[in-house]
Image: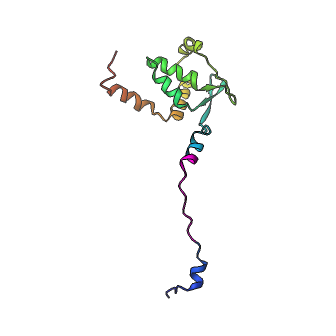
């Protein structure tokens, strides 16, 4: 049986809502007017709970300016680790020598994995790519 189009059918059909594209000002207000929420992870590091927060663009760029891979790794720990629920960093630049003496094991592996999740970086792939980089050279 075919449906017949009648005036009643046409009048009762609801118009499809067309989504209005945001204006420049609306986009700017959403992206610049407030800080987008970052992600975070709670991890236990040698029996102490710390909060790791997703880095800002500034933190990532600052870390890239650091010369050695060792310094970059320690800078990331210092920059991303917070006292849970506060804006207080757990570590300071003066803690670098002590951080470098931490035993490498499951705790540091958890820390490394959490940082990788928060930055979206696959550490193993990144290392392989660095090794292939002809401009990186080897020291």
Q: How is the image coloured?
A: rainbow
* Residue 78 place in picture, x, y as percent: 57, 21
Residue name at image x 45 percent, y 30 percent: 123
* Residue 74 place in picture, x, y as percent: 52, 19
Residue name at image x 53 percent, y 14 percent: 100
* Residue 67 place in picture, x, y as percent: 43, 17
Q: Nearer the viewer, residue 68 or 61?
A: 61
Asked whether, in this view, residue 2 is left or right of residue 11, the answer is: left
Residue 21 to residue 46: above or below:
below
Q: Is residue 119 magenta?
A: no
Is residue 44 visible to us here? yes
- For the stretch drawn in magenta, the main secondary structure is loop
Q: Is residue 25 magenta?
A: yes
Region of the chain picked out in magenta, as a range: 15-26
Residue name at image x 58 percent, y 76 percent: 13
Residue name at image x 55 percent, y 25 percent: 106
Residue 118 to residue 17: above or below:
above
Q: Nearer the viewer, residue 67 or 28?
A: 28
């Amino acid at each position: 049986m075919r449906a017949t189009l009648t005036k009643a059918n046409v009048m009762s059909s609801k118009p499809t809502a067309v989504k209005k594209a945001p204006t420049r000002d609306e986009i700017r207000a959403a992206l610049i007017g407030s800080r987008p929420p970052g992600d975070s992870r709670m991890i236990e590091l040698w029996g102490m709970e710390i909060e790791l927060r997703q880095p800002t663009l500034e933190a990532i760029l600052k870390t890239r300016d650091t010369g050695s891979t060792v310094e970059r790794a320690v800078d990331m720990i210092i920059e991303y680790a917070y006292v849970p629920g506060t804006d207080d960093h757990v570590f300071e630049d003066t803690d670098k020598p002590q951080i470098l003496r931490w035993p490498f094991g499951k705790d540091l592996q958890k820390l490394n994995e959490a940082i990788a999740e928060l930055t979206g970086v696959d550490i193993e792939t990144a290392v392989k790519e660095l090794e292939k980089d002809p401009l990186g050279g080897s020291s």
